[in-house]
Amino acid sequence: IVSLPAAALLNRIGTVNAILLALATMALSCFMMQSIGQYQSYSGILAALFVMAAGITALQVAANPLIATLGPAKTSHFRLTFAQTFNSLGVVIGVHFGSKIMLSKEITSIEKNPLTGVVEHITDPTQKLDALSAVSHSFALIGILILGLLLLVFLTRSTIAASIAPNNTHGRIRVLDALKSKWAVFGAIAIGLYVGAEVSIGSIMIKFLNQSSILNLPLEKSGEYLGNLYWGGALLGRFIGSFLLTKVRATNLLAFAATCAAILCLIVAFSQGPLAGFSALAVGVFNSIMFPTIFTITLEKSRVAQSSTSGLLCLAISGGAILPYLVGTIADKADLNLAFLVPLVAYLIIAFFAVQARTPYNYAHSTEHTNSASVSQILQNPRR
């Protein structure tokens, strides 16, 4: 909902102002959460979460291409991958401590009770007050930290603006121009498949490792494995990938990572025990460099405005939601192992994207500004 409007706003007010507005929106949502939580309004909390998501999306649309352009073009893949390591660090910390809380014996024992038992438990006035107070304080702290970041960007806005490379298009910029770029659409498909594959594997990992035929881990321990090994592997992979991207072409590394992830999914689908369990966890390492490399490769290949391309790529992230649905359907009707065939197909398409992107782009024969792209055309002839 927000990605394309954010791209239009970016075109109108510029990168630095868009980042400042996005950070202000995120900070506002945190203080909304703090105040609304005190009134115990569920719809109000949903509204605050939407405002937060809008700010985060706008920040991604503006910041990702900015990182890619802050320096030589040949090192853009390294810069965005290195920046994404901090994203992974946040995920690892959040999943690690979140799983300890949500999968603790106290919580899981409550979940086994009837619904009325849960409601009675959480409506205790003292417990409710403590829970709401903890949530309010957490969001207040996050809001203050975001305001600090906003102040830092504001104080350095002139330096950032001076470092931004000129846009790669001329004339009036239209957000929907990205749909006319075959590479922008192909990149959007690839990034949607990556997000869907990564999230779907992460969403079934705890139950998968809990199975007696895999690792037979308690739910709390499975949560620790998810945070420390799967998401931790993504963090480690981004550090290693950042270094490798200074030595290896991004397209080659992306093709290698996607192929390895597909092979691991194949192993998981048709094996049992520790081999299947640790193969599933190892996918996180190869997921690590996919988002930043797909993003920067698409920015390089697309011949429309970076803001328009970035907006389409961020919009495509939500398109990955279809994969968890497919994975869940297969897991319910067959088993969790065979559900890994869905991300396997996604990784093969990403590998195909990377291989096709190795071919140098012929700018002289570009028709992207006048021809619209269809998915079938892209898959048949992505070099155009």
Image (cartoon, grey):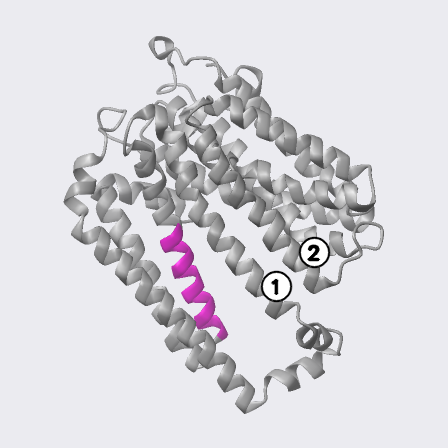
Marks 2,1: beta carbons within 8 A: yes
Q: Residues within 10 Å of mark 1 (few under 14, many from 20)?
A: many
Residue type indicated by callout 1 = Ser
Q: Secondary structure at mark 2?
A: helix
Residue 26 percent across, percent down from the top left: 35, 60
The image's mark for residue 206 is 2
Report the front residue among 164 and 313: 164
From what the image shows, is residue 308 above or below residue 22?
above
Residue 333 percent across, percent down from the top left: 81, 48
From what the image shows, is residue 345 above or below residue 355?
below
* N-term mark: 2 or 1: 1
The image's mark for residue 113 is none
Q: Main secondary structure of the magenta part?
A: helix
Quadrant in which residue 173 is drawn: top left
Residue type indicated by callout 2 = Ile
Q: Is residue 124 magenta?
A: no
The image's mark for residue 99 is 1
In magenta, the rendered stretch is 42-56
Q: Is residue 40 visible?
A: no
Q: CA distance from mark 2 to mark 1?
A: 10 Å
In this picture, residue 66 sits left or right of residue 293: left
Residue 19 percent across, percent down from the top left: 28, 49
